[in-house]
Image (spheres, helix red, strand yellow):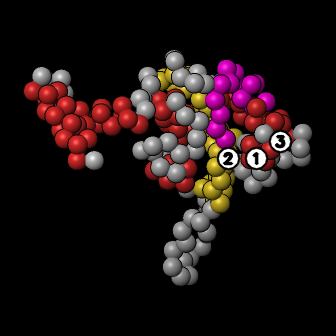
Amino acid sequence: MYFIRSILRVVIAVLVVAGVASAPATALELRSLFKGKQLDAREISVDTNTAARMLSDYRGRHGLGPVKLDPTLNRIAADHALKMAEADKVSHVVRGEGSFARRLHSGGYDAAVAAENVGGGYFSLEEAFAGWRKSKSHNKNLLRPDITVMGIARADATGSKYGTYWSLVLARPYERPQGPATGPSTMPGGLIIGR
C-alpha cells in the first residue's frame, strides 16, 4: 500500500510541475481513472405533456386518476437522468448524488408518497413506458393509486452502454395540516420508493 501511495504522489507531482492540472483536480482525475470515467452527456427534450397523457390514459384504463406534470419533479428527474448518463449507470443512486429521498429533499420537493422508475436503452417515450409496464415493480409504481403528479426526463451519452437514460418521478405532494398548531410541527414522513 505504501508503494502505491508513493507512486501516486510522484505522478501527481509530475503532473503539477508539468502544469497539467492543480493537485486537487489531478487527484480527482486519478480517482476517476480507477473508479470509471464520466461521459459527456446531454439532456434530451421529452414531450412531457404527451408523457403525462400516456400515463394518465394507462391509469384510467385501470380505474385510477390522472397525473399532472410538476415542474420541480421534471427538474429532479432531469438531474438524475443526466447523472446516470454521465456515470453510464442505470440506478436510483449514482455516486455523489445521494438517495432518491435525498434528491427529492435537495430538489425542494416535500412528498407524502414518491416513487421513481429509471431505465436505459429506450429511444422513445413509447419504448420507455412499454418497458416499465412489462416490469412488475415499475408497473406497480405506474399504477400506484396514491400518486397525483409526475416528472420525466431523458439524457443521452454517446459511447455509453445504453445510449439513453430515463428517470420518471411519481409523487403526491405533502400537504401541511390546516388549522392551528396543537403540538410539535409535523414533518413529512411519506413513503419513498425507488424501483
Q: Are marks 3 and 1 in contact (CB under 8 Å)?
A: no
Q: Are marks 1 and 2 in contact (CB under 8 Å)?
A: yes
Q: Secondary structure at mark 3?
A: helix
Magenta range: 117-130
Q: Position of residue 23 (x, y in %)?
A: 18, 36
Q: Secondary structure at mark 1?
A: helix
| Residue at x 60% of width, y 73% of height | 179
* Residue extending farthest left: 17
Q: CA distance from mark 3 to mark 2?
A: 18 Å
Q: Quadrant of residue 6?
A: top left
| Residue at x 42% of width, y 44% of height | 96
In this figure, which residue is indicated by the disc labeled 2?
A: 195
Identify the mark at residue 137; answer none if there is no mark.
Answer: 1
Looking at the rendered structure, the kind of residue marked 1 is Ser
Q: Position of residue 97 (x, y in %)?
A: 45, 45
Mark 3 burial class by Cα count in 10 Å: few <14, some 14-19, many 20+: some
Would you say 110 lies left or right of 40 here? right
Which numbered disc flags the more N-terminal residue, 3 or 2?
Answer: 3
Q: Quadrant of residue 134?
A: top right
Looking at the rendered structure, the kind of residue marked 3 is Arg
Q: CA distance from mark 3 to mark 1?
A: 15 Å
In this figure, which residue is indicated by the disc labeled 3?
A: 59
Looking at the rendered structure, the kind of residue marked 2 is Arg
Q: Quadrant of residue 121?
A: top right
Residue 19 on the magenta span: no
Would you say 129 lies left or right of 20 here? right
Would you say 46 lies left or right of 94 here? right
